[in-house]
Image (cartoon, coloured by chain):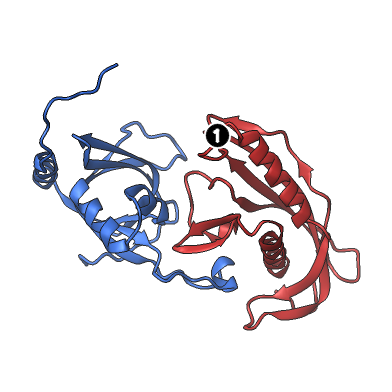
Chain colours: A blue, B red
Amino acid sequence: MSADLTVQNPTDQALRAADALLRSNGGTTAYLQMPTTPGDASDAGQLGLDAPNFQRLPLEPVVFRRSRPTMTEGEPAKYELLVSGAAVQAAVGEMQVASADLLFQMAAGVAIANELFLIEAVSLSECMGSVYLYRLLLRESTSGWQIQTAQD
Amino acid sequence: MQNAKDTFYIALRNRLTTVNPARTMTLRGIVRPGILVEEAEAPMAQLPLDAFVLRWTKLAADTQLPSILAQLTCEIHYATAGTQGNSGLDRGRALEEMDYELLQMLCPSSTVKMNYTETPAEQMGTSIFWSPATFAAGVTTRERVGRVATVEVFTFQEQGEQ
């Protein structure tokens, strides 16, 4: 098997195109619920006694949509969130984590329009080795909590 | 009964730091021993690898004694995909290592009950004690192998204890 030796000049074209598409298709803001830094290393923090005081990390532009049109009784609805690769890159830098995977792993959920959602799975789309879009599969939280977002 | 659950977790966590100090994980931005209480953490789609996860399930109480004797069932879930250096081919060995670590963490099978709602934690008048672990058959899910060990934890309800 031989290597692909064609000349490919990486640009951020796909990244900008994805951002433009997300903005023009109902782009909104989602907030990752992230642990505070430095985190709570105390016994009380590990036993659920201390409030974790999650901080909200905004991601925009994002598109939020229902992924499963057929509803099943007793099953929480599933949604998908399309997130700009540039927004995730910025969030990774802000939180000083090693990768986007770790960022989503650390998140306790996503708040969108005052509702809390839990991250079930993460996939990505890339062009010439550069990720331009993340797709998060979300499950509606059954807690029914209203999460205050910065837009309110 | 919450004091018993808290005491059991802290006892196992402290013993893990002696049994295998290298078994750590990063959770909520903190590097800590590789053990957690599921109900005290944010919900997760998949349990973490190479860590022990305590899940409290059944509860029974003997009210015929002078003090109520509560029996709490704790499921300890753990799974591994082996190590990257061995391309995961050592996952069976890694699971066996976790089995052995758990056996060591559970001995001795009692500890003094503590109240962690006070700062510093307050020693209580009784101890908690637990049964030997019952190990379920290993479960393979793609590259993960895991197991559940079940332990019965016993505690006397003290006067005024919540």
Q: Farthest residue to the right: give it.
A: B65
Q: Nearer the viewer, residue A123 or A38?
A: A38
**Residue B151 position in % (x across, y down):** 77, 51
Tell which of B16 and A124 is nearer to you. B16
Residue located 42% across and 34% down the image: A72
Q: In the rendered view, does A114 fall on the left or right side of B34?
A: left
Q: Is residue A67 above or below residue A27?
A: above
The quarter of the image holding the C terminus of chain A is bottom left
Position of the N terminus of chain A by quadrant: top left
| Residue A62 visible to an observer of this rendering | no
Q: How many residues crowd mark 1 within 10 Å: few (<14), some (14–19), many (20+)?
A: some
Three-letter amino acid code of the residue under disc 1:
Gly
Residue A29: percent from left, percent from top: 21, 55
- Which chain is home to disc 1? B
Location of residue A89 in the rendering, given as x and y in whole percent from the top left corner? 23, 52
Asked if residue B41 is positioned above or below residue A24 in the image, the reply reads: below
Give the residue number, with chain letter if any, for mark 1.
Answer: B88
Label 1: which secondary element: loop
Residue B86 picture quarter: top right
What residue is at 83 percent from the left and 50 percent from the top?
B132
Question: Residue furthest toward the top?
Answer: A1
Tell me if A37 is positioned left or right of B16 in this view: left
Count how many numbered circles sit on residues in the image: 1
| Residue B95 sits above or below residue B102 on the image | above
Which x, y percent locates residue A79? 32, 41
Question: Where is residue B14, by image quadrant?
Answer: bottom right
Tell me where residue B82 sits by quadrant.
Answer: top right
Q: Is residue A143 visible?
A: yes
**What residue is rendered at 55% in x and 40% in y?**
B83
Q: Which residue is at the front of the view, A108 or A25? A: A108
Task: Tell me what residue is drawn at x 61 percent, y 35 percent.
Answer: B90
